[in-house]
Amino acid sequence: YSIIVSQTGSGYSWRGNAGQNRITRSFQDLIKDNWGKYIYIRDTETGKYWSAAWMPVQADYEFYRVRHGIGYSIFEHKVDGIYTSTKVFVAPDDPMEYIEVKIKNESKRERKLDITTYFELALGIAPDEHREYHRLFIDTGFDEKNNALTAGKLIWLNDDTWRYTFFHSSSEKIASYDTDKESVIGQYRNEKNPVMMEKKNLDGKSGRFTDACSSIRVEVEIASGEEKTVVFTLGAAEKGKESYIDLAKKSSVNDCRAAFDGVLKLWSRFIDAEVVNTPDEALNIMTNIWLKYQAISCRLWGKSGLYQVSAGYGFRDQLQDSLIFLESAPEFTKKQLLLHAKNQFQEGDVYHWWFTIGGGGPRTNCSDDLLWLPFIMDAYLKETGDFDILNEIVPFADGKDADMYTHCKRAIEKCFSRFSPRGIPLMGDHDWNDGLSCVGPDMKGESFWVAEFLYMILKNFIPVA
């Protein structure tokens, strides 16, 4: 389960794959940055409202600060004497996310507030270009007994039913809810001035054939100087394996705090295992913290970003990324090696990339992809001494199987079958530089980069061979 959030509070959620299994809808627009999971705060006595982050209301504020941490982001906001600190993060062991809103009344009077969430539901392929068609298949409901809004979808990959149940809950009793964008945002309005903020209660619409969104409202009374915490959760439970009811029950403040402690422990394992100290503090932060976090969270686990949404693994890309685990958790590098070997063909060539849900991808003549398997294997063996991995049996993408040593050997042998008449590796569709895609698609252009890469791999693999 993953989320992306920007400095304005916009972003989206997905489970397993941001392109094939998007939970909340979003479209790339870094200028507007106007798609997200938004929280509205309203003074019910005056009717004034604002958002917990700057978007979408963009209210004049007394204070605003955003901190992106390792596995979490915090939005501090003060409007009309109400200070909020909103922390968002993914649970370390469950397919769900937490939005913890700490509220402090810094005004001189008691305040009666309601807090309302809003986001659109996608529940499947993203971007869903045929949005008006896909929304016909989303079915929403409200489980009053378990204090949760729910949703499913009757169409997904290859017209299958979406195999998850979406839920949205809170630590507070849900006072009202709505799942229809028309009655939440309003005709010809937008998220900055939604019609729901003019209503005492949300309309309580659910079922099929709405413009599916998720919106719940809770109520809070807070004395002058008092602090209170409200938690919202959302997630996707896989049918037959997980219960949305059990997940929704983890929406208490204590559950939220325990989950956040787990986040800190999780990332400490990967971040703190190796520390580099140089006279350049910026380099230290980049090397010791940020590059590790980005390689793991964005490149390997999330496979997505604000600039690019991916529905798959790149054979070369994520093998390279997996080197980040060698110092802290080499078993994750091993897992990546075994996974990529399954996406190699018996001839030794590989998928350039493949879908993580359902499999399949382009089988190309890229000249470097296949060589990253023996290259990363060599790095893994030198770091761990785990030579038993070479004996592990892994199937090929097109049938039959072989040990990992054979997988590596066939990659090297396939490269040798693609040489020019003067003994230089052919460029093929491209080498490590994808931009050289017009140099050798007819298997004529050469790559001296691949020649150097192959030479290094052969030299390093001599002890193994």
Image (spheres, grey):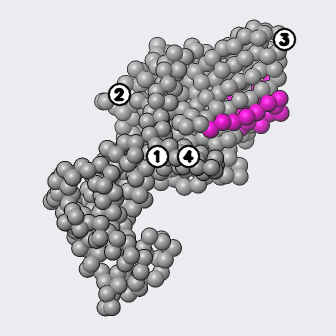
Residue assigned mark 1? 296
N-terminal-most mark, 1 or 4: 4
Q: The residue tagged with tag 3: helix, strand or loop?
A: loop
Residue highlighted by disc 2: 242
Task: Identify the residue shown where x is 46% and y is 27%.
Answer: 262
Residue at image mark 4? 277
209 up-or-down from 411: above or below: above
Q: Which residue is mark 3?
A: 108
Q: Is the N terminus in the top left, top right, bottom left or bottom right quadrant?
A: top left
Report the front residue among 177 and 75: 75
Numbered tag placed on residue 442 in the rendering: none
Q: CA distance from mark 3 to mark 4?
A: 49 Å
**Amino acid type indicated by mark 4:** Asn
Q: Earlier in the sequence, mark 1 or mark 2?
A: 2
Query: Distance of mark 1 from mark 2, alpha carbons?
Result: 25 Å
Within-10-Å neighbours for mark 1: few <14, some 14–19, many 20+: some
Q: Is residue 192 left or right of residue 434?
A: right
Residue 269: where, in percent of width, then height? 43, 36
Nearer the camera: disc 1 or disc 2: 1
* Amino acid type for the residue under numbered disc 3: Lys
Q: Which residues are magenta?
A: 47-68
Mark before the other along the chain sequence, 3 or 1 = 3
Q: Are marks 3 and 4 in contact (CB under 8 Å)?
A: no
